[in-house]
Image: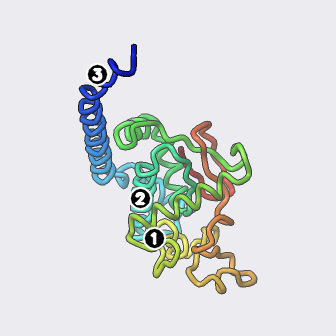
Amino acid sequence: MKIESAAPLLLVLAPAIVLSLLALSVLGRRRRAARGHYIDGFDFARLLDRRLAKRRPELDPTQRARVIEGLREWFHLHLAAGRRQLSMPSQAVDDAWHEFILFTRNYQDFCRRGLGRFLHHVPAEAMATPTQASTGLRRSWRLACRRAGIDPKAPATLPLLFALDGELGLADGFRYRIDCLAAGGAGSGAYCATHIGCGSGCGSDGGGDGDGCSGGCGGD
């Protein structure tokens, strides 16, 4: 086909292509909004509160509710991230996630309706490269800050998933501080929130469903 004869056809098709792309964009936003509403309305406590109480007997009902809210936030981050890998900043929420996965049918259905895919759980040892966990943690930080309306480069406070383990006083939790001098102090056991990348121990890349991470785990 000659360029001269193709040009009128392109002029005719261009508006249809643009409209199709706009329709797909609107459809995608509506689908994400519907999935977000599903995540918001899901009754995690019905399945997880008693199991979490056994796994974390040091937590009272109010604290367990905070952990469950953190789990809800974790799935919202994955909805926003699409298929980009994230790493888990909270040991308490990671525990709740492990318990949820054990309800295999419920978890599979939740992932399908809330995320549009199955969210795998992968330990650090299964990462393709040693840097994947820290890359995923930085992405988790940016998305969590965005959802909380926090400047990720100059935070005045910590988003829920990064504040929770410290708030709960977990001995084995991940601690983050805005004060980088305090975070880097000897024996502090805390990470500097504005320099995340040296943070928690594992993430995931969409393959495997392992357990037993030495730190927070993530999903694709």
Which one is earlier in the sequence, the residue at label 2 or at label 1? 2
Q: Residues within 10 Å of mark 3 (few under 14, many from 20)?
A: few
Image location of residue 214, percent across then percent down: 69, 56
Q: SS for tag 2?
A: helix
Q: Nearer the viewer, mark 3 or mark 2?
A: 3
Residue wearing tag 3: 9
Q: Amino acid at mark 2?
A: Glu
Q: Is residue 14 above or below residue 176?
A: above
Which one is earlier in the sequence, the residue at label 1 or at label 3? 3
Residue at horizontal 70 percent and vertical 54 percent from the top: 131
Residue wearing tag 2: 73
Q: Amino acid at mark 3?
A: Leu
Q: CA distance from mark 3 to mark 2?
A: 48 Å
Image location of residue 31, percent across then percent down: 29, 41
Q: CA distance from mark 2 to mark 1?
A: 10 Å
Q: Looking at this view, is 128 or 50 the one in front?
A: 128
Q: Nearer the viewer, mark 1 or mark 3?
A: 3
**Image mark for residue 159:** 1
Residue at horizontal 54 percent and vertical 56 percent from the top: 94
